[in-house]
Amino acid sequence: MNEVAENPMTIREYAEKMQVSRQSVNSKINRHSEELKNHVFIIKGRKVLDGFAQDFLKPTKDNALLISKNAELEKSLSITKFESRENKKLADSKEKKITNLTHELETKNKLFEEYVGIMKKMEQCIIEKNALIAEKDKRITELTEKVSNFEVFAERLNKLFAVFEDNANISIVQKVASGLFGKK
């Protein structure tokens, strides 16, 4: 016997060591109950296998290949499950980020719409102010023209007064002056 078979083992320990399921070990024990009658014991409520039972229940070469392949598949499945959990976490994280970015985009779109409204109001206000400025510019032009005309008139009037002063004795000049200025 080899050293594995010398130590009694529970079915659970044996199944783990041989990388098989407990159900398959129990099933094989039930199928070969006659051969294993004196080699399977119950100690403290657990089935225990002696060395003979352990050797007898060892998987055959074909079963060993299946067990090996099964172990590889279980390892691959375990890795895939781990990757799946990690991908799920990443997807959840990305989904949360998308939700946050969508909310942020909606908020910014609302602000943009408000700014567009404000800009339109400001644009209208600028148009109104520009119209008012144009009116004021027109009025300034009119007043400037009047001032210019008034200056020309004042200059002519000064010349006329000068003529009146030179000719103050003439009765017509006196009449015009008194009519204009209320002097007698």
Image (cartoon, rainbow, N blue to C red):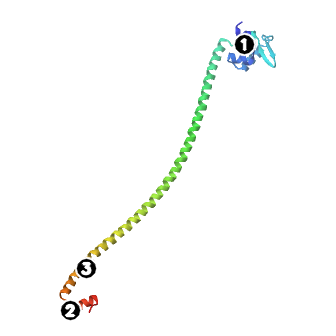
Kindly report which numbered mark, 3 or 1, lies closer to the viewer in this rendering. 3
Kindly report which numbered mark, 1 or 2, lies closer to the viewer in this rendering. 2
Which residue is located at x 71 percent, y 18 percent?
Answer: 15
| Amino acid tagged 3 | Ala
Kindly identify which residue carries mark 2: 172
| Amino acid tagged 1 | Leu
Which badge, 1 or 2, comes first in the chain's sequence? Answer: 1
Give 50 or 112, whichever is nearer the viewer. Answer: 112
Q: What element carries label 1?
A: helix
Looking at the rendering, in which quadrant would you find the C terminus? bottom left
Residue 179 x %, y %: 27, 90
Q: Is residue 156 above or below residue 137?
A: below
Which badge, 3 or 1, comes first in the chain's sequence? Answer: 1
Kindly identify which residue carries mark 3: 154
Kindly identify which residue carries mark 1: 57
Residue 54 x %, y %: 73, 12
Which residue is located at x 45 percent, y 61 percent?
Answer: 121
Other residues around mark 3 within 10 Å, as few (<14) / some (14–19) / many (≥20): few
Q: What element carries label 3?
A: helix
